[in-house]
Amino acid sequence: MVGITASNQGGPAFSGASGFVSQAAASGPFGMGLRTPLAALRLAPGTSAVTVAAAVEKSLGGSALAVDPRAGAAAPLDQIRPLLLLVVALACLICAGVSANTTALAVSERRREIGLLRAAGAGPRQVLRLLLAEAGVLGLAGAGLGVGAGLLLGSLAVTHLGASDLPAPPLPLRPWQLVGSAAAGLTAALLGALLPALAAARSQPLVALRSAAEPAPHRSVRGLALAGLARSQRARVRSPPWSWAAWPCSSAPPSASR
């Protein structure tokens, strides 16, 4: 036995081990003679496998097969691609909901500011562009952070799988895929903020100023308790006297004289 080698794309349970023997051992104990059933050629980087296979067939005869080991590396990802697309769609839906809630809360807290802008001459389109620009900045920041976190977690997962007894295919990510992911997050944020921004842009200046000037009803627990106590005392004072000052029928009232 000359040596044993194993693939670096996973453990022996998935890739299998290979053994190499000398030519004398192959022709003697193994009974292979001078027959060579298979010859594998590892090409230098930049060499065309198809060209080499054609040259081998022409020189040695037989059949030569050109195989790219990296061709099947993305097969596991292709199998779960529909699930990944479903996760992306769910993430975009959540992003749109969070953006809509955030924009609606910002519009509710800035009604006076929006009313002043409209009263100063700002048109509905200007208010709409202002709110959408704010949502776009937040969406772009969130998309950038999400893509960066995804790349980091993906590289950590590949490193962890490569160190264990599991196959670790590389992540075949292209630049347009990363840009598309960030664009999807930004689009979801803008679509979520569109309805609250339209409602704020269509509001009348006087209505916005009036609604912002009205104080919100605020009642404390102490005030409610005092109001309840005052009502109970008023009801007690207005009740008829015989409901609380009547003598029992079985006993007579005490005499004033001894």
Image (cartoon, rainbow, N blue to C red):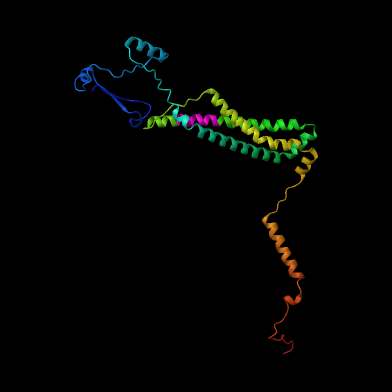
Q: Quadrant of residue 101?
A: top right
Image mark count: 0
Asked if 98 appears above or below 71 in the picture, the reply is below
Q: Quadrant of residue 4?
A: top left
Left or right: where 67 falls relative to 236: left
Left or right: where 88 falls relative to 193: left
Q: Nearer the viewer, residue 125 or 177?
A: 177
Q: Nearer the viewer, residue 41 or 190?
A: 41
**Residue at (57, 27) in percent of width and height:** 180
**Residue at (63, 36) in percent of width and height:** 99
Asked if 220 appears above or below 41 in the picture, the reply is below
| Magenta span includes 149 | yes
| Magenta span includes 234 | no
User: What kind of secondary structure does the magenta stretch mostly adopt?
Assistant: helix
Q: Position of residue 198 (x, y in %)?
A: 72, 35
The segment highlighted magenta reads 146-156
In the rendered image, the quadrant that contains the N terminus is top left
Q: Position of residue 206 (x, y in %)?
A: 80, 40
Q: Position of residue 253 (x, y in %)?
A: 72, 85
In the rendered image, the quadrant that contains the C terminus is bottom right
Question: Can you name the residue that lies furthest to the top here?
Answer: 59
Q: Quadrant of residue 110?
A: top right
Q: Position of residue 50 (x, y in %)?
A: 41, 14
Question: Can you name the residue that lies furthest to the bottom here?
Answer: 258
Question: Can you name the residue that lies furthest to the front here?
Answer: 62
**Residue at (62, 39) in percent of width and height:** 97
